[in-house]
Image: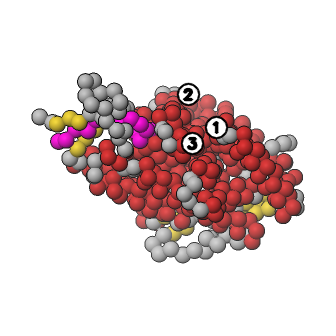
Amino acid sequence: MPKVTEFQGSNQRGQERSAPLRLEDAIPDDRIGKDAVNVLILYMVILLVIPSNRSFAALGGAGAPAALFALILLPWWGWYHLQRTRRVVRMRIQPVRTAMFIFSGAVLASYAAGATRALTEAEANALDLGILRAAAFASILSVASDGIPSRKRLLDILRFCCFLTGVYAVLGLFQFFTGQSFVAGLNIPGLTVTDFGALQDRGGFNRPSATARNPLEYAFVMSMVFPLAITLALNDAPRGIWVRWFPVAAIALATVLSVSRSAIVGLVVGVAILVPTWSPKVRKMAGIATIVLLVFVWALVPGMAGTLLGLFGGEDSSLKSRTDSYTVVADFWHLAPLFGRGLGTFLPEYRILDNQYLVSLIDMGTLGLIALIGVMVTSFAVALVGQHRYADPLFRHLGPAFAGAVAAGASLTAFFDVLSFPQAAGVLFLICGLSGAYWRMRDPWKAVVDA
């Protein structure tokens, strides 16, 4: 019969009160617990360092290196659950993982709906690719949610993500000022260039994209990471000031100089979640820093201020294109309102919607759209709720930071088809998974059963 050890904090019925349990003491010493952070860091390197438009040509659309690496992690995560010698009983529900399970079910339902109708060859290939992409998303979210063994290791991966995104932002700054891509001509053995690559132009300024496929993907990554970066900069005192503030400065400057409305919107949304949690002193410092940044950009790049203001006023062809798409979306949705036509089968040659919510409504129907929104809403909610169960000030502040990151990603999901871009989708599901890990590690812990 299993031996059960209860960890009830200060309220054990008739038993001696115990000291608060550290998370590190409660989690079994399983192999995935030691390695999950390392493989997630490797995933981030593959995702952001290798240009997003490189893939293995023989695998077609399924050849993105980061997606292939994520697919390897899915059976590894399943093996962990099957082979571990200990398990946690009376587990609190893992809301983020549950939401992802529902989303995966919606993807399968849309696949079945798509497979039952006549498909062109391009649509059939896209339908199969959609399943692989969804599996990669589920893999990253699940490993991030379940495989991080301690709060210290959660901090390790957050620090690395912020630093790597800071370097990513710096590459974009070099592209802006020099007009050189630096990655377009990069030759990586075994990988071929699929699309994009050249720098775009807006208002006479270079639109940087770092290693992303386009400036929107670049903006998405920076907007999601920024709330985490500024939270660590303000609260992660043991690290040096330059190490903490480098990602914040790099991302903030790169965002303003990205000549992207989406980047600014995402940054503002993420910070708006954080501001109510800051002290009056921090809010004052943030206001001064914002003014200094804008004045610096105005002096450094003549004409940039007018270009940025023009992005939010007057007639905009990209906005008009998005609003003109509503009739097309309604027509396609009426053909398959519940389960959709199959993830990925609404091809770009039909119309570029620049709105993942609308694409998902067509591809996966009403249920699929609700499931996608559910993953983001759940990640947002558990971060805000989970903060109240932490005594450590740094971890209390990480709750709003995760919520701000997810809110930024959710807002920019309405600006382009996120799930078709490896870096954007990868960062979205990784941070949602890290929100799940944050929820799992809150106090008090559970009971452990020895098999």
The C terminus appears in which quarter of the rendering?
top left
Instruction: Specify start and end residues of the magenta stretch as a single range.
Output: 439-451
Q: Is residue 326 visible to us here?
A: yes
Within-10-Å neighbours for mark 2: few <14, some 14–19, many 20+ = few
Please state which amino acid type lies under the numbered disc 2: His
Is residue 160 one of those drawn in magenta?
no
Residue 175 drawn above or below residue 269: below
Mark 3, other Cα within 10 Å: few <14 / some 14–19 / many ≥20: many
- What's under tag 3, amino acid-wise? His
Front position among marks 2 and 3: 3
Residue 334: numbered disc: 2
Outermost residue to the top: 13
Looking at the image, which is closer to me, 443 or 399?
A: 443
Secondary structure category for the residue under label 2: helix
* Residue 259 appears left or right of 349: right
- Label 1 neighbour load within 10 Å: few <14, some 14-19, many 20+: some
In the rendered image, which quarter is residue 15 located in? top left
Q: CA distance from mark 3 to mark 1?
A: 8 Å
